[in-house]
Image (tube, rainbow, N blue to C red):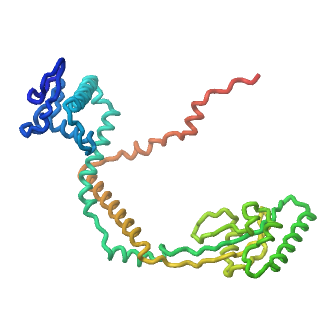
Amino acid sequence: MICLLCTAFAVTGAGWSIAAETFRAPGIGDDAVLATIGDEKISAGQFRREMTIRSGGLPGQFATAEQRRALLDDMIRYRAMVAQARAEGYGTDPDVIAIFERAMVTMFQKDRLQAPMENLDVTNEEVAAYYAEHRADYDRPARSRAAIVFFKSSPLATPEKQQELEERVTTAMKEVKDLDPSITHFGPVARKYSEDRASRYVGGVIGWLIKYPNRQYKWEAPVVDAVFSLSEPGQMAEPLRTEKGIYLVRLVEREAASPRPFGQVKNGIRHQLMRSKGELSDQAFKAGVLAGINVDVNQEIFSGIEAPASAAETIEEQRPPQLPAG
């Protein structure tokens, strides 16, 4: 049975409706029971909050009694379903409890951490000190722009074919020396000889290689090492012989490492330090929670629990047997 707060409604026709002045009347407090659905109750305050949430801050929402009554009916239906679900035992369902606990912990963490997080601050002195201590981390790394001429070879090539290849390489190197001194790439030599399609028609230029530690490059290690060993534009390394073939490598342009000014990186440093302080605050909060409760782990049982099967193993186990041939 649903009972509505009598002073809040007026009977119209066959049903209930909300009087236009009901929720503007100062005499109705938030604790007043607006509706009772079995053992469930909806207070005037809950209804007001729901109107505020659903209006999205837009003026004129729920201005009519019909609109407000439609909202109340929706809330009543929802509370009725809550009551029925509880009656059928859903309140003790492990999955439901898990969802509730996750929501509860999320709100608990938010409430406990919000104030400390809002009070976090990073001073200008801290930012400057971090920059001074980690100055090298903010340097622009050296980078080199290179060009190649690639001669494809095979370990199965006959001595005659290998000799022909070596002669082509020698001829190409001579033609490079005859190029205009202002050309630092391979120009027409790449178009004539190179078997690298991506760079062949652009003078053999393969773009910039940035000198980062442990960086992975598209090109073979000897090629990369040769590029970084060259210091002057137009300089060419000795021919490189790899499993794939022979490379001519030339430096097109080089930029040395350079420091990034403090003004360019200070905002990023401040954000990084704020994030670090936030993580420390979060860790301290979690440590405090654990410190206030007794925790005992049965190491013997823990050691005996195996990891779940991988997805591939599970799929293989579920795969039906093949039909016999024939």
Work out whether residue 151 or residue 245 is closer to the camera in this orientation and state it.
151
Judge left or right: residue 178 versus residue 271: right
Quadrant (top left/top right/bottom left/bottom right) for the N terminus: top left
Judge left or right: residue 271 versus residue 188: left
- Above/below status of 220 relative to 46: below
Quadrant in which residue 265 is drawn: bottom left
Quadrant (top left/top right/bottom left/bottom right) for the C terminus: top right
Residue at x 86% of width, y 58% of height: 156
Residue at x 77% of width, y 68% of height: 149
Residue 262 coordinates in the image, percent (x, y): 42, 77
Residue 289 coordinates in the image, percent (x, y): 26, 52
Work out whether residue 266 or residue 133 is closer to the camera in this orientation and state it.
266
Among all residues in the image, which is located at the extreme top? 14
Work out whether residue 18 or residue 260 is closer to the camera in this orientation and state it.
18
Among all residues in the image, which is located at the extreme right? 160
Residue 47 coordinates in the image, percent (x, y): 19, 36
Among all residues in the image, which is located at the extreme left? 27
- Above/below status of 239 relative to 13: below
Residue 280 coordinates in the image, percent (x, y): 33, 61
Quadrant in which residue 131 is drawn: bottom left
Residue 47 visible in the shown view: yes
Q: How many marks?
A: 0
Residue 79 visible in the shown view: no
Residue at x 44% of width, y 41% of height: 305
